[in-house]
Image: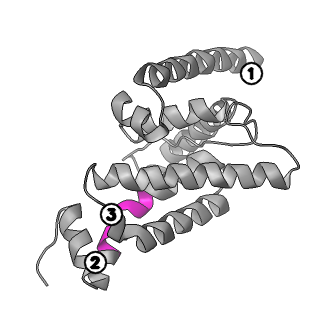
Amino acid sequence: MSFIDDDEALIATALNGSSYAWEKLVKRYEGRIYNYGLRLTGNATDAMDLMQEVFLGVYRNLHRFRGDAKFSSWIFRIAHNKAIDMNRRRALIQGRTFSIEDDENGEYLVPEQTTDNEPDTQLSKGQQNEEIQCMLQKLPMEQRLIVELKIYQSQTFEEISKMQEISENTAKTRFYAALKKLKVVMEESHVLS
């Protein structure tokens, strides 16, 4: 089989029934989707559930991908919607009504990427990641989503605004409000430690 490199070629080949192309497409995005889910949900089980829901949705709707945007934007839009649905279900199970403005139960984890494989460095990075994760969990869902999309998915404010169906200015406002709140949380955590 010839080497398939770009997403569009993989999609076209997968739509023609190639399991190889589908698997390659999944492998290309599964780590990013899983980490996205981990940052959103706060635990590995929910992140895995979210990842499975995303890829099931992609599999069922791959024929609907029109190519108007990048495939990565499309798949993260699906992940975004599935994460919101998961958060709503969690809120309903806990007997609460859901509001994206009032999401104290949604969690994001923010692992730092490292290439250093020394055990003590890995432990230190893991502890730092846990601290960052705890801090991000204190943000409302709408702000966490913006931080996730901007910092971890490298989306532009224009892409974020389209994905979340808000204005670019609203996306910027939420992002900078999140950073300001994170700064306060960080300062408070250092005072308490």
Query: Going 31% across and 84% down the picture, which residue do you hit?
Result: 19
Q: Where is 155 relative to 186, above or below?
A: below
Residue numbers of the magenta segment:
23-31
Front-most of residues 44 and 130: 44
Residue density around tag 2, few if under 14, some if 14–19, many if 20 or more, within 10 Å: many
Front-most of residues 39 and 120: 39
Horizontal and vertical percent for residue 150?
Answer: 42, 33
Q: CA distance from mark 2 to mark 1?
A: 52 Å
* Residue placed under numbered mark 3 in the picture: 28
* Residue placed under numbered mark 2 in the picture: 14
Q: Give the number of the mark in front: 3 or 1.
A: 3
Indicate which disc residue 193 carries: 1
Amino acid, disc 3: Arg
Amino acid, disc 1: Ser
Horizontal and vertical percent for residue 79?
Answer: 50, 54
Query: Going 26% across and 50% down the picture, which residue do you hit?
Result: 68
What is the magenta segment's predominant secondary structure?
helix
Residue density around tag 1, few if under 14, some if 14–19, many if 20 or more, within 10 Å: few
Query: Going 55% across and 39% down the picture, which residue do you hit?
Result: 124
In the displayed structure image, the side of residue 175 where residue 132 appears, left or right: right
Give the quarter of the image for residue 134.
top right
